[in-house]
C-alpha cells in the first residue's frame, strides 16, 4: 500500500498537489503501520523534492504534510535542511509553517538552525508589525544558545518598538531568553523595567508575566507602576488580568498594613461595599477606628471589583483570592456570589472553585451560608464534585441548618454511587461531632443505617459510630450489642476491626457479650484479614485483663495462633502482648501496668476537614489545589507591621515626561495623521467626529491635569456638572440620538486609524473615565458612548484653553466630562499628564470644526431617531 | 506557562501534540492514563494530576481529553479556562470538535494553536482576531485557494488586536443589518419524592448574533433588571454603565457571541412548569417490579412543552424492563441500567406515560431506594425568571432587531 502511494506521488505533478497532499496525510498512518522504515525514508525523499520544487503550491503541501507529521508526534527532523531553505519564502503560509517546524526542531539541529537567523534579523526590520512580531517570536523560540546575544539585541529593540503588539511579543521573548540563559537576568530586568512603564494594555499582562518569571522578588520595580496597573486593569485582556491580579495580591501583602482587625467578623456581609466609598469613609471615621486604609490599597480593591463579573472563570477566581487575601474581612463577602455562579460552569472549573470554597468555608462560614442550597448534590455530578460539595456542606453546617442538611444527607446515603454514600456517612459523623445538639440524632440515624442492605454503607457506618462512641463514653451498651450482632454478617475488614476494637474498649460494659465475641473470633481467626487479626489480639488482651476467668484459655489459644501467623506484624504483636499480660517469672515491672496500658482513656479522634491545612497556600493556585508546594510557588508574605513608605508609588511628572520621549514622538506623529484624516472625514461626513474628539480631548485634560491642578480643577468640573444636570435634562432626549450617531462615526474612524497611537494612551485611566461618564449618563446619557475614542485621542488634544472654548459652547453640544467626585478617590489622580504643547493650527482647526458642528448635527437628529422595538 | 498540549481520544490514543517550549515526551501522558484507569469513568478523571516533574491539567469535552502539561505554579483555572477556550475555538472554526475533524484540519489546528499561545502564554484568544489571522476552512475558500494560490493566513495584524475593542474587527459590512438575541434559561431543580421543590436555580444566558455594519454601539435595557443581580458579561459590556444604570451598553463582536449570563439564585421561588407522577415498586418476594411514570404540564402559561426526555438510572438489581410508552420511544440499556425515554411534546389532553414491568435479579434483595429521575424539556418563548429585554435601542444603525424570546431548558431531578 505504501509503495502504491509512493508511485502515485511520483507521477503527480504540482497540479495535483492538493489532492496529493490530502491523500498523503491520510496514508501516513497506514504506511507507518506497515512499519517499513525504507518506505518512510522514501516518503521523506518525496517531501524533499516537493520542498525543492519551484512551485509554492508543492512546497505548501509538503509543509502541510510535515506539520501533520509533527502533530502526530512523528519525527521529521531529517527534513531540516530542506525545510530551513524555505524560511525566506514569500508565501506567508509556507513561512508560518516553516516557523512551526523550526521552533519544533531547531533545538535538535542547532547548527543548521543558524542558517535561518539572518532572515529573522531582516524581518525584524520589516515595516509590517505582524512580520516583525512573528520574526521575534520565532527567533526567541529557537532554543539555540549561540544566538543569545542576537536575541538580547532583538528584545531590546523590540521593547522600544512603536507597535504595542511587537512590544508584547518582546515581553514574551524575555521569558524565553531567561529560560535559555539565566545569565542574562540583569539585562532582562532592565528591559522589564522599561516595559513595565508601558502604557499599553496589550503589553501590561505580558510584561507582568515576564516579571513574575524572571524577577518576582524585585517588588521595587512595581512601585511606580502600581497605580497605573490598577487603573489599566479593567482594559487588559483576560489572561493578563489574572497574572496582574496575582502579582498585585503579593505586592499588597508586602506594602500595606493589615486591614483585618481582631474580632472583625462578617457582621455585615459585604453590605458596606455596595455603598459608595464616601459613605464608607464616613463610617470608618464614625467608628473611630485607628486603622485607615492606604488609598492605594483601596484603589486596588475597588478597581478589581468589576472583574468579578468577567466571563472568564480564572479572572473571577483571581479577584476572589485577592479579596480573600487583602481586603477587609467585611468586604470579602461579595466574592461568594460570583464564585457560586461559577459552579454552573464546566466540571473542571467546578472542581477547582469548590476546592477553594471548601478552604474558605472553614475559616469564614458566614460567607457561603446563604448559598447553602447551591451546594446540594445533583445525581448527575461526577463523584469528585459530589464529595467536594459534601465537604462544603459539612463546613457550613451549624445549629440552624443541620436539620435540613441531615434530611438532605439521608437522600445521599441512598445514592447508587456507593463511594459517595460512604463519604456522606463520614460527613454525618463530622456533623455529629461538630454540633453537639445533633450528636444523638446522628448516632441514631447511623444505627439505623446498620441495617442497610449495602455492605459498604454498613461498614462505613460502623467506622463512624466507633468514632462517635469514642467521643461520648456515655452508656451506649445497646448500640454496642447491636454491632456485635453485625459481626456475623459484615465482611468489610475495617468495619469488623472497628467493632472488635469498640467491644474491647467497652468490654466492662458488655460483660456477657464480649467473651462470646472473642470465642467466635478465635474460631475464624485464621481466615481474617490482618487488620482484624490485630484487633482480635487486642480484644483478647483486654478481656484477659478484665475478665481472665472466662477468657484466659481463649486468649492463649489466640496468642498461639498469632505466634505462627504469616504476617510479622501479627507475630510481633502476639509476642509483645504475651510478654505483657501473661505473668511469668521473667516479666518485668511493666506487666503490673498492663491494664493501664491497654485500657487507658484514649483521646477521641478529631474528625477534621481535609481542607483544614490548605489555607497557608494562596487561594486559586496550583499548590492549593494539590496541597503540595508546586515548583515556582511564591509565598504570600504576612502583612508588615508598619507600612513601608507609601510615597514610593507617587509618580513624578518630570520624571515621566523624560521617560516618555518615545511616546511623545509617537504622539506628534499621530496628531499629524489625525489631522489629515480629519480633513478627509470632514468632506464626507460633515463634522461630527472632530466634534466629539475635541470634547473627549478636553475631558482628558481635566482628568489628566488634575494631578497638577488638584482642587481647582475638580471644583470647576463640579460646578459645570451641576449646571449641566439641569441643561442636559432638557436636552437629553435630543442629545441622545445625536451623540450616539456622532460617536459611532468617530469610533469607526478612530479604530481604523488605531495603529500605534492607540496605546500611547494618555494618563487618563479607563476607570476614571468610565466613572465620570457613568455619572453623566445618569443625567444626560450622552457622554457615555465616547469612552473608547476619548481614550485614544485624549493624548492628542490637551490644552487648557481648548477646554474653555469648548465650555463656552457647551450648552449646545454636550457635557464636559466631569470628575466623578463621589467615587473619585484622590488616589487615582496623582497620575498626571504632562501637557505637550498643541500647535496653534490644530487649535484653530478644532475650534472651527466645533462651531460648525452643532447646527448640521441637529438637523440630522430626526433621521437618526431610531428606536428599535423589542420583540 | 503551558508547556505542551496533548489531545487524547477515548481509546487512549494521543492523536495530536503541540509544544510551545522544549519538547515534553509524550510518555508523560502515562501518568494521565494511570489516573484515567483509576477513575473508571472519564468524568471522574481529576482535572489536575501531579507527576514528578510536570503537572497535567486536563479538560474533557466532546469525548476528547485536552491535556496541558505545565511545569511551574500557575493558577489552575487559568489553564482550564484556556483549554475550554481552545475547544470553543475549534468548534467555532470547524462547526464540531471531534477527533476526525481535528485530524482532517490538522494544519489549521496547528496554525491556530500557534497563534493562541506564545511561550505558553495566551496571545490571541478572541475568535474575531484569530479568524483574521487564520481563516476558517470553507469549501469555497479551499477551491479559491487552489486556483489562485492564495492562503488561509492573513498577512496583516488584525485590527482588533491593537484597538480597545479587540473583539471586533473593523470594516465590517452588511447589506442587511440585523441583530438577534436569544434568551435561554435553564432551571435546575431538585424535587423530592412528594413533589416539593428542594432547590431550584435559574441560569440564563443571552446569546446574540449581531450582523451590523461598522462600529455599532448598542444599548439593551431590561424590564426588570433587579432580577439580574448576579451576572457575568462578555468583555464588550461596559461594567460601569451597568452598575450605575442597569443598562447594557456595548460594542458587539461580529457574529455569534454570548453577551451575558446570569444566575437567579435558589431563594426566589421558581414555578416549575412540569410534574412527574411516578409509581415504582419493587416487591421483595417476586422477581418483578412495577414501573409507571406520567409527565404532565403545570403553569406553562399556555406554552407547549417540547423536547421532553426522561432518563433514570435504575438500580443494579434490575435485569430488564418491558415497558410501553403512550408516546415517544424508550430504551433501556441492561449493562449501564440506564432507562431513557424520549417523549417529545406534551399534549395536555393526553398525558404521556410509560408503564410496564421490571424483571429483577432473582434472589437479590429489593433495592431500597427509588431511582432518580432526570427530566429535561424545553419551552419556547417563555422565560421562567420573568426576565424580558424591554427595549432594544439600537443607536447607530437602521437595523432590524429581533429578539427571539428564548427557550427555557430545564433539568429536573426527582428522587
Image (cartoon, coloured by chain):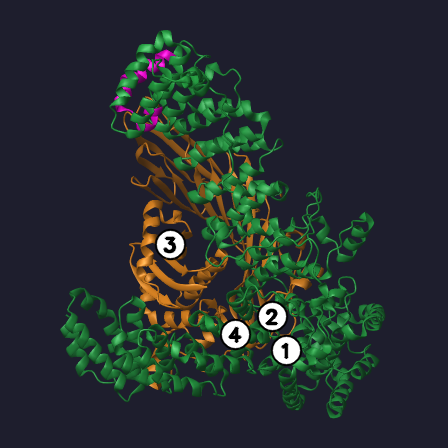
Chain colours: A green, B orange
Nearest the viewer among A115 and A775 is A115
Q: Nearer the viewer, mark 4 or mark 2?
A: 4
The chain holding disc 2 is: B
Q: Which image quadrant for residue A842?
A: bottom right
Residue under numbered circle 1: A747
Cα gap from disc 4 to disc 1, whole angstroms: 38 Å
User: At which x and y percent is residue A488?
Assistant: 33, 19
Cα gap from disc 3 to disc 2, whole angstroms: 47 Å
Nearest the viewer among B54 and A833 is B54
Q: Which image quadrant for residue A457?
A: top left
Nearest the viewer among A18 and B209 is A18
User: At which x and y percent is residue A274?
Assistant: 71, 53
Q: Earlier in the sequence, mark 4 or mark 1?
A: 4
Q: Residue farthest to the top?
A: A549
The chain holding disc 4 is: A
The chain holding disc 1 is: A
**Is there a contact, CB below 8 Å, between mark 2 and mark 1?**
yes
Q: Which image quadrant for residue A753?
A: bottom right
Q: Nearer the viewer, mark 4 or mark 1?
A: 4
Q: Which residues are magenta?
A: A514-534
User: At which x and y percent is residue A226?
Assistant: 65, 67
Is residue A860 in sight in this rendering? no
Quarter of the picture holding the C terminus of chain A = bottom right
Residue under numbered circle 3: B52
Compared across the picture, whether A405 is left or right of B28 comes to: right
Residue under numbered circle 4: A188
Q: Specify the principal SS of the magenta part.
A: helix
User: At which x and y percent is residue A503?
Assistant: 42, 18
Same-subunit check for callouts 4 and 3: no
Q: Secondary structure at mark 1?
A: helix
Q: Earlier in the sequence, mark 3 or mark 2?
A: 3
Amino acid at each position: 500500500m505504501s509503495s502504491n502511494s509512493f508511485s502515485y506521488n511520483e507521477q503527480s505533478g504540482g497540479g495535483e498537489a492538493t489532492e496529493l497532499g490530502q491523500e498523503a496525510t491520510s496514508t501516513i498512518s497506514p504506511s507507518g503501520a506497515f512499519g517499513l522504515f525504507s518506505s518512510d525514508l522514501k516518503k521523506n525523499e518525496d517531501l524533499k523534492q516537493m520542498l525543492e520544487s519551484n512551485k509554492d503550491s508543492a512546497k505548501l503541501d509538503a509543509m502541510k504534510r510535515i506539520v501533520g507529521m509533527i502533530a502526530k508526534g512523528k519525527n521529521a527532523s531529517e527534513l531540516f535542511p530542506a525545510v530551513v531553505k524555505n524560511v525566506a519564502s514569500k508565501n506567508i503560509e509556507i513561512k508560518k509553517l516553516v516557523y512551526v517546524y523550526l521552533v519544533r526542531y531547531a533545538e535538535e539541529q542547532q547548527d543548521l538552525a543558524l542558517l535561518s537567523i539572518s532572515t529573522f534579523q531582516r524581518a525584524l526590520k520589516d515595516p509590517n508589525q505582524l512580520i516583525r512580531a512573528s520574526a521575534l517570536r520565532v527567533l526567541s523560540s529557537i532554543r539555540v544558545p549561540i544566538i543569545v546575544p542576537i536575541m538580547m539585541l532583538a528584545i531590546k529593540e523590540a521593547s522600544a518598538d512603536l507597535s504595542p503588539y511587537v512590544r508584547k511579543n518582546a515581553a514574551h521573548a524575555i521569558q524565553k531568553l531567561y529560560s535559555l540563559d539565566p545569565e542574562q537576568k540583569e539585562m532582562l530586568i532592565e528591559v522589564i523595567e522599561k516595559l513595565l512603564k508601558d502604557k499599553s494594555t496589550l503589553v501590561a499582562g505580558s510584561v507582568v508575566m515576564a516579571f513574575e518569571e524572571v524577577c518576582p522578588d524585585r517588588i521595587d520595580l512595581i512601585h511606580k507602576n502600581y497605580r497605573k496597573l490598577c487603573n489599566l486593569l479593567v482594559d487588559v485582556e483576560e489572561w493578563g488580568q489574572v497574572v496582574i491580579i496575582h502579582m498585585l495580591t503579593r505586592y499588597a501583602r508586602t506594602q500595606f498594613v493589615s486591614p483585618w482587625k481582631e474580632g472583625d467578623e462578617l457582621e455585615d456581609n459585604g453590605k458596606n461595599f455596595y455603598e459608595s466609598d464616601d459613605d464608607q469613609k464616613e463610617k470608618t471615621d464614625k467608628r473611630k477606628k485607628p486603622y485607615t486604609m492606604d488609598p492605594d490599597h483601596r484603589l486596588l480593591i475597588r478597581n478589581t471589583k468589576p472583574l468579578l463579573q468577567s466571563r472568564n472563570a480564572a479572572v473571577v477566581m483571581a479577584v476572589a483570592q485577592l479579596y480573600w487575601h487583602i481586603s477587609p474581612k467585611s468586604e470579602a463577602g461579595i466574592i461568594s456570589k460570583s464564585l457560586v455562579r461559577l459552579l454552573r460552569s464546566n466540571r473542571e472549573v467546578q472542581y477547582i472553585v469548590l476546592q477553594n470554597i471548601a478552604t474558605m468555608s472553614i475559616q469564614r462560614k458566614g460567607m457561603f451560608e446563604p448559598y447553602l442550597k447551591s451546594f446540594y448534590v445533583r445525581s448527575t455530578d461526577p463523584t469528585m464534585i459530589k464529595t467536594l460539595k459534601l465537604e462544603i456542606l459539612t463546613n457550613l453546617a451549624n445549629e440552624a441548618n443541620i436539620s435540613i442538611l441531615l434530611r438532605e444527607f439521608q437522600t445521599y446515603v441512598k445514592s447508587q454511587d456507593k463511594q459517595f454514600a460512604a463519604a456522606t456517612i463520614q460527613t454525618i459523623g463530622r456533623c455529629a461531632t461538630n454540633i453537639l445538639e445533633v450528636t444523638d440524632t446522628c448516632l441514631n440515624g447511623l444505627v439505623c443505617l446498620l441495617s442497610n442492605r449495602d455492605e459498604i454503607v454498613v461498614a462505613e457506618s460502623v467506622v463512624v459510630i466507633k468514632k462517635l462512641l469514642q467521643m461520648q463514653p456515655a452508656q451506649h451498651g445497646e448500640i454496642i450489642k447491636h454491632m456485635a450482632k453485625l459481626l456475623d454478617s459484615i465482611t468489610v475488614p475495617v468495619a469488623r476491626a472497628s467493632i472488635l476494637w469498640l467491644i474491647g474498649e467497652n468490654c466492662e460494659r458488655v460483660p456477657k457479650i464480649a467473651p462470646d465475641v472473642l470465642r467466635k473470633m478465635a474460631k475464624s481467626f485464621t481466615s481474617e484479614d490482618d487488620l482484624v487479626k490485630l484487633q482480635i489480639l487486642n480484644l483478647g488482651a483486654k478481656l484477659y485483663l478484665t475478665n481472665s476467668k472466662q477468657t484466659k484459655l481463649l486468649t492463649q489459644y489466640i496468642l498461639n495462633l498469632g505466634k505462627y501467623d504469616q504476617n510479622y506484624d501479627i507475630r510481633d504483636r502476639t509476642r509483645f502482648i504475651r510478654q505483657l499480660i501473661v505473668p511469668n517469672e521473667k516479666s518485668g515491672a511493666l506487666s503490673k501496668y498492663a491494664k493501664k496500658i491497654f485500657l487507658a482513656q484514649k483521646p477521641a479522634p478529631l474528625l477534621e476537614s481535609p481542607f483544614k491545612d490548605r489555607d497557608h497556600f494562596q487561594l486559586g493556585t496550583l499548590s492549593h489545589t494539590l496541597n503540595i508546594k508546586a515548583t515556582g510557588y511564591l509565598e504570600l508574605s504576612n502583612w508588615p507591621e508598619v507600612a513601608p513608605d507609601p510615597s514610593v508609588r507617587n509618580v513624578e511628572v518630570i520624571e515621566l515626561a523624560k521617560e516618555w520621549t518615545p511616546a511623545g514622538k509617537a504622539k506628534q506623529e499621530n496628531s499629524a495623521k489625525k489631522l489629515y484624516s480629519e480633513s478627509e472625514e470632514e468632506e464626507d461626513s460633515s463634522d461630527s467626529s472632530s466634534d466629539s474628539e475635541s470634547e473627549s480631548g478636553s475631558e482628558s485634560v481635566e482628568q489628566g491635569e488634575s494631578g497638577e491642578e488638584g482642587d481647582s480643577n475638580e471644583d470647576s468640573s463640579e460646578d459645570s456638572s451641576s449646571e449641566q444636570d439641569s441643561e442636559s435634562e432638557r436636552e437629553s432626549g435630543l442629545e441622545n440620538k445625536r451623540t450616539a450617531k456622532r460617536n459611532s462615526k468617530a469610533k469607526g474612524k478612530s479604530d481604523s486609524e488605531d495603529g500605534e497611537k492607540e496605546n500611547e494612551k494618555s494618563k487618563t485611566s479607563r476607570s476614571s473615565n468610565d466613572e465620570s461618564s457613568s455619572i453623566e449618563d445618569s443625567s444626560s446619557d450622552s457622554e457615555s458612548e465616547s469612552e473608547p475614542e476619548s481614550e485614544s485621542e485624549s493624548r492628542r488634544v490637551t490644552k487648557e484653553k481648548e477646554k474653555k472654548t469648548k465650555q463656552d459652547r457647551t450648552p449646545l453640544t454636550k457635557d464636559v466630562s466631569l470628575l466623578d467626585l463621589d467615587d473619585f478617590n484622590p488616589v487615582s489622580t496623582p497620575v498626571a499628564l504632562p501637557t505637550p504643547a498643541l500647535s496653534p493650527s490644530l487649535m484653530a482647526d478644532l475650534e472651527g470644526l466645533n462651531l460648525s458642528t452643532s447646527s448640521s448635527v441637529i438637523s440630522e437628529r430626526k433621521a437618526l431617531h431610531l428606536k428599535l422595538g423589542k420583540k | 506557562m503551558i508547556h505542551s498540549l496533548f489531545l487524547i481520544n477515548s481509546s487512549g490514543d494521543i492523536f495530536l501534540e503541540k509544544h510551545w517550549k522544549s519538547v515534553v515526551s509524550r510518555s508523560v501522558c502515562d501518568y494521565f492514563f494511570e489516573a484515567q484507569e483509576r477513575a473508571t469513568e472519564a468524568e471522574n478523571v481529576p482535572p489536575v494530576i501531579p507527576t514528578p516533574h510536570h503537572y497535567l491539567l486536563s479538560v474533557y469535552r466532546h469525548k476528547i481529553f485536552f491535556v496541558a502539561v505545565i511545569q511551574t505554579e500557575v493558577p489552575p483555572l487559568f489553564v482550564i479556562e484556556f483549554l475550554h477556550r481552545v475547544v470553543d475555538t475549534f468548534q467555532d472554526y470547524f462547526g464540531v470538535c471531534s477527533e476526525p475533524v481535528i485530524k482532517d484540519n490538522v494544519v489549521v489546528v496547528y496554525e491556530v494553536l500557534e497563534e493562541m499561545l506564545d511561550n505558553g502564554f495566551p496571545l490571541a484568544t478572541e475568535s474575531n482576531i484569530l479568524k483574521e489571522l487564520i481563516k476558517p476552512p470553507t469549501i469555497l475558500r479551499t477551491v479559491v485557494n487552489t486556483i489562485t494560490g492564495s492562503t488561509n493566513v492573513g498577512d496583516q495584524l488584525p485590527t482588533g488586536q491593537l484597538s480597545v475593542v479587540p473583539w471586533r474587527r473593523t470594516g465590517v459590512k452588511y447589506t442587511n443589518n440585523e441583530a438577534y438575541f436569544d434568551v435561554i434559561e435553564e432551571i435546575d431543580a431538585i424535587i423530592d419524592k412528594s413533589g416539593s421543590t428542594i432547590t431550584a436555580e435559574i441560569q440564563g444566558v443571552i446569546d446574540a448574533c449581531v450582523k451590523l455594519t461598522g462600529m455599532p454601539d448598542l444599548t439593551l435595557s431590561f424590564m426588570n433588571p433587579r432580577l439580574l443581580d448576579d451576572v457575568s458579561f462578555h468583555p464588550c459590556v461596559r461594567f460601569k454603565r451597568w452598575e450605575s444604570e442597569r443598562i447594557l451598553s456595548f460594542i458587539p463582536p461580529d457574529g455569534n457571541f454570548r453577551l451575558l449570563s446570569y444566575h437567579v439564585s435558589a431563594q426566589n421561588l421558581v414555578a416549575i412548569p412540569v410534574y412527574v407522577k411516578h409509581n415504582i415498586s419493587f416487591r421483595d418476594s417476586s422477581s418483578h417490579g412495577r414501573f409507571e411514570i406520567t409527565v404532565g404540564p403545570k403553569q406553562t402559561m399556555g406554552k407547549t412543552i417540547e423536547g421532553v426526555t426522561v432518563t433514570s438510572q435504575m438500580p443494579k438489581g434490575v435485569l430488564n424492563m418491558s415497558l410501553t410508552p403512550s408516546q415517544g420511544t424508550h430504551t433501556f440499556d441492561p449493562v449501564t441500567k440506564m432507562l431513557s425515554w424520549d417523549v417529545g411534546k406534551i399534549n395536555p389532553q393526553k398525558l404521556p406515560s410509560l408503564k410496564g414491568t421490571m424483571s429483577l435479579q432473582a434472589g437479590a434483595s429489593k433495592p431500597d431506594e427509588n431511582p432518580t429521575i432526570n427530566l429535561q424539556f424545553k419551552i419556547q418563548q417563555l422565560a421562567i425568571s420573568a426576565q424580558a429585554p424591554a427595549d432594544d435601542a439600537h443607536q447607530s444603525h437602521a437595523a432590524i432587531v429581533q429578539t427571539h424570546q428564548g427557550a427555557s431548558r430545564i433539568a429536573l431531578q426527582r428522587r
